[in-house]
Image (cartoon, rainbow, N blue to C red):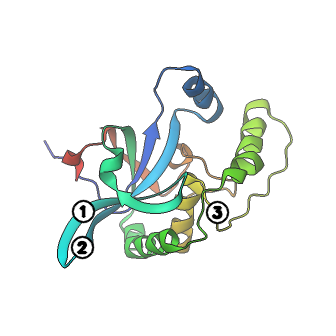
Amino acid sequence: MKIFKLQPVDILVNVNDRNGPISAVKRWAVGPYSHVFMYMGQMTIVVDSVVLRHPMLFESNGRGVVLQSLSNRYDQKVVVMRLKSEYDRRRIPFILEEAIKLASDGKSYYDYYAIARWVLPRILREKFHLPIPMAWQRDAYQICSEAVTEVFIRGQLTPFPYWDVPLPGDFVTSSLLLEEAKWGILSADWV
């Protein structure tokens, strides 16, 4: 049996299977997926001349776009999506570089406004078939799915065949570039 290991630029999508009214409303609105982040690989960190290698992730959360320890997400249920083609995998170094640049940009705040401006109208259009015009525009502010999409676009890969604000579930259901690699509880064993 082959042991599963994460690879750089694997996309991890949280699965929302929690009980409770808020989780149920979120599942109804956007499906079973609640958050998306990207595995950066083992990154080298130097602290007081001590060199450490640590598994890191890239995400946008309430603080904005950040690089942080993958261990902050251990014990969460996720589906891991991986680039399908060898041709696309050649773009991985560029995607990683763009993720570092975006996380280093002090203007990469979390985009609370995008939820009202792009996400809610998309949900209303899809759930109730309302003719709501959509004109999502990329900018420096990012919700989680925008941040991951942004580094793919900057790395010269287009993850979706449409131009709407991406949602976490789109990485599982709509990306032409990605395929499911693993479903389960994220743990240190995957690194």
Q: Are marks 1 and 3 in contact (CB under 8 Å)?
A: no
Whole-number angstrom distance, CA of label 2 to CA of label 1: 12 Å
Callout 1: helix, strand or loop?
A: strand
User: x and y percent of residue 12 in the render?
Assistant: 41, 49
| Residue closer to the observer: 90 or 112 | 112
Identify the residue position indicated by label 1 in the image. Answer: 54
Q: Nearer the viewer, mark 2 or mark 3?
A: 2
Q: Amino acid at mark 2?
A: Val
Whole-number angstrom distance, CA of label 2 to CA of label 3: 30 Å
Identify the residue position indicated by label 2 in the image. Answer: 47
Residue sitting at x 79%, y 30%: 128
Whole-number angstrom distance, CA of label 1 to CA of label 3: 27 Å
User: x and y percent of residue 185 in the render?
Assistant: 31, 37
User: x and y percent of residue 68 in the render?
Assistant: 38, 59
Instruction: Give the left or right position of residue 185, taking residue 162 as reference.
Output: left
Identify the residue position indicated by label 3 in the image. Answer: 141
108 lies above or below 49:
above
Q: Mark 2 packing: few (<14 Cα in 10 Å), some, or many (20+)?
A: few
| Residue closer to the observer: 159 or 50 | 50
Callout 2: helix, strand or loop?
A: strand
Q: Is residue 172 visible in this depiction of the protein?
A: no
Q: Earlier in the sequence, mark 2 or mark 1?
A: 2
Instruction: Give the left or right position of residue 179, taking residue 118 as reference.
Output: left
Q: Earlier in the sequence, mark 2 or mark 3?
A: 2
User: x and y percent of residue 124 in the render?
Assistant: 77, 36
Callout 3: helix, strand or loop?
A: loop
Q: Nearer the viewer, mark 2 or mark 1?
A: 2
Residue sitting at x 62%, y 52%: 166
Residue sitting at x 77%, y 50%: 117
Q: Amino acid at mark 3?
A: Tyr
- Which residue of the protein is positioned furthest toward the left in this rendering? 1
